[in-house]
Image (spheres, grey):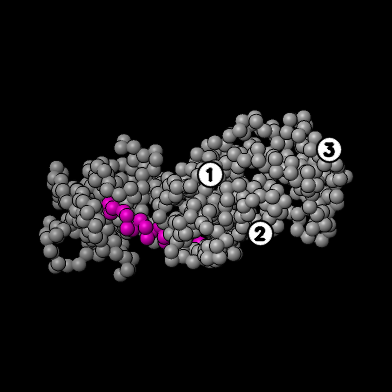
């Protein structure tokens, strides 16, 4: 992050220079109720990079205060995602590690007359909170004695009441202009079994009470969170102060990063999974880090994208092309180049022997000899892309194959289409071509210029492959969420890849020449190859 300045980095520099802190300690505090998505990456990367920039530490802490919605599956997925992004937490911690201390700090608030047990229901509490122009109404149970409140709170902890029957509320100011300060609920009853503490507790702290205590207990110096928590900061500071925590963290808010046509809501993503609109949290169309990883995104591209967009005090929205440009830059430097035909059209070389096959040794990338070489085959029967042929050349700008037009096939020969075979509907299903043996690649032939260069595979020296081509999973708009799903977000094509894929490829991802960057999907096998297109070679973004 050395070259990326932002307002939080400036604050940290000032705090170190003034000796307010000796070291920087940050934390990433996800709730384990879903998988991380690209929006969370901003918080992950900035927390780790900012601390690392000053030789500090970053904790991974799970805010597991809502057992009914949390699961160890999500815990494990989050740990894996952070490791994949390239970060090693100083410690892996849980809010539930501090339940005992939080309970005793709540008792302290009661003893100070700053918390009380309320019998109002959630609906009744909501009605008494008022609104931005009307002050709230005090609960009839607000002035219970300290001894009564302690007894009731201890009975809550013993499981003597039903869920929703009683809550513990902070006693602050029902007329506060900040709605968060109007006696917020800080404990509620829940009999859901906790993934970490089992049935030890039946009362759980609310986020606005637990979170500042967690930061204070861990000695977090700078508690970074998104902009919607700005109005919660007075309550954050109140909890730290009134529970008399010895270490005082500072909450700093930053703007969210949104990407056009991308779902940035765990609730919506969970709906897609639960209702089976996608094949799981790691569906390659999903903006989850596990989905992006499966599709072939690289952690380097995501880190460069997040750091490249900066960190500001306002919410920002960027188009998909910005993320994809960082992705292409990374893939271009770390991909082999091979050939594959996604939408095959059969080609027969009529002046080539049926049993003859030629092998051409070519580099995986001419600019990176260290990647080694592969073998490209030329034979009588080939496949090219359907889109690389038109029967009649439309204009001078058409630089592919047409009837009576000559093109170069990568690494091999010039071919010329002399005839076409059509099916009963009139569709071209096979090309009859001739090749010129004088134009062999590397021979130095320069007597005539072909009408472009196209890729191909040899029909008998190729591997049948499923290609997964992806578009946006959802479109932006005002229509209900499910109605905005893109029915063409996943298109499957049956095609072929060159024989070199039967051996190990020197890079994890690869460029299929002219078609985009690809990787093997996790379900792919040597017997049934499945490729995901990570991104096209050029921007497909359209307003």
Q: Main secondary structure of the magenta part?
A: helix
Q: Position of residue 538 (x, y in %)?
A: 39, 61
Q: Position of residue 230 (x, y in %)?
A: 66, 59
Q: Secondary structure at mark 2?
A: helix
Q: Earlier in the sequence, mark 2 or mark 1?
A: 1
Residue numbers of the magenta segment? 319-340
Q: Residue at x 61, y 33 (%)?
A: 197
Q: Residue at x 31, y 62 (%)?
A: 392
Disc 1: CA contacts within 10 A as few (<14), some (14-19) or many (>=20): many
The residue labelled by disc 3 is 148
Q: Secondary structure at mark 3?
A: helix
Q: Secondary structure at mark 1?
A: loop
Q: Position of residue 410 (x, y in %)?
A: 23, 57
Observer able to see residue 15: yes
Report the mark closest to the observer, 3 or 2.
3
Report the mark closest to the observer, 3 or 1.
3
Asked whether residue 16 is drawn in magenta, I would say no
Residue 352 as seen in the image, left or right of residue 81: left
Q: Position of residue 346 (x, y in %)?
A: 28, 48
User: In this rendering, is residue 479 above or below 17?
Assistant: above
Front one among 382 and 16: 16
The residue labelled by disc 2 is 230
Task: Determine the residue located farthest toward the bottom in the rendered image.
Answer: 396
Check residue 35 in the rendering and tell me which mark sits there, or answer none.
Answer: 1
């Amino acid at each position: 992050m050395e070259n990326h300045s932002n307002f939080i980095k400036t604050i940290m520099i000032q705090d170190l220079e003034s000796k307010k802190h000796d070291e920087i300690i940050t934390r990433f505090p996800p709730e384990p109720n879903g998988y991380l998505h690209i929006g969370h990456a901003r918080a992950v990367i900035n927390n780790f990079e900012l601390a690392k920039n000053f030789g500090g530490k970053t904790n991974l802490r799970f805010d597991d205060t809502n057992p009914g919605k949390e699961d160890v599956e999500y815990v494990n997925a989050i740990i894996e995602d952070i490791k994949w992004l390239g970060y090693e937490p100083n410690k892996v911690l849980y809010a539930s590690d501090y339940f005992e201390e939080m309970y005793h700090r709540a008792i302290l608030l009661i003893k100070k007359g700053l918390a009380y047990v309320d019998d109002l229901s959630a609906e009744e509490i909501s009605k008494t909170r008022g609104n931005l122009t009307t002050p709230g109404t005090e609960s009839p149970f607000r002035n219970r004695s300290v001894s009564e409140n302690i007894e009731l709170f201890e009975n809550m902890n013993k499981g003597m009441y039903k869920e929703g029957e009683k809550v513990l509320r902070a006693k602050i100011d029902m007329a506060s202009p900040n709605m968060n300060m109007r006696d917020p609920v800080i404990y509620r009853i829940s009999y859901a079994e906790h993934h970490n503490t089992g049935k030890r507790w039946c009362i759980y702290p609310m986020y606005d009470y637990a979170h500042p205590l967690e930061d204070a207990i861990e000695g977090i110096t700078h508690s970074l969170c998104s902009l919607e928590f700005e109005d919660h900061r007075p309550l954050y500071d109140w909890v730290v102060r009134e529970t008399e925590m010895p270490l005082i963290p500072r909450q700093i808010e930053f703007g969210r990063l949104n990407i056009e046509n991308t779902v940035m809501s765990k609730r919506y993503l969970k709906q897609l999974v639960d209702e089976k609109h996608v094949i799981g949290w790691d569906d390659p169309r999903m903006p989850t880090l596990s989905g992006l990883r499966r599709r072939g995104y690289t952690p380097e591209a995501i880190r460069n994208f997040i750091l490249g967009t900066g960190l500001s005090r306002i919410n920002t929205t960027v188009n998909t092309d910005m993320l994809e440009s960082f992705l292409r830059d990374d893939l271009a430097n770390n991909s082999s180049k091979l050939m594959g035909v996604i939408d095959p059209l059969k080609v027969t070389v009529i002046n080539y022997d049926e049993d003859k096959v030629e092998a051409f040794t070519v580099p995986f990338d001419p600019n990176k000899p260290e990647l080694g070489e592969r073998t490209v085959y030329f034979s009588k029967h080939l496949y090219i892309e359907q889109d690389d042929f038109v029967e009649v050349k439309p204009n001078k700008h058409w630089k592919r194959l047409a009837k009576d037009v000559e093109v170069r096939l990568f690494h091999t020969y010039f071919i010329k289409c002399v005839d076409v075979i059509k099916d009963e509907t009139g569709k071209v299903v096979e090309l009859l071509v001739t090749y010129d043996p004088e134009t062999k690649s590397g021979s130095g032939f320069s007597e005539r210029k072909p009408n472009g260069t196209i890729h191909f595979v040899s029909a008998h020296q190729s591997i049948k492959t499923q290609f997964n081509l992806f578009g946006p999973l959802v479109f932006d708009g005002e229509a209900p969420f499910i109605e905005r799903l893109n029915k063409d977000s996943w298109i499957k094509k049956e095609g072929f890849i060159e024989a070199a894929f039967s051996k190990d490829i020197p890079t994890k991802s690869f460029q299929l020449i002219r078609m985009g960057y690809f990787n093997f999907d996790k379900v792919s096998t040597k017997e049934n190859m499945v490729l995901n297109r990570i991104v096209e070679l050029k921007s497909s973004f359209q307003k």
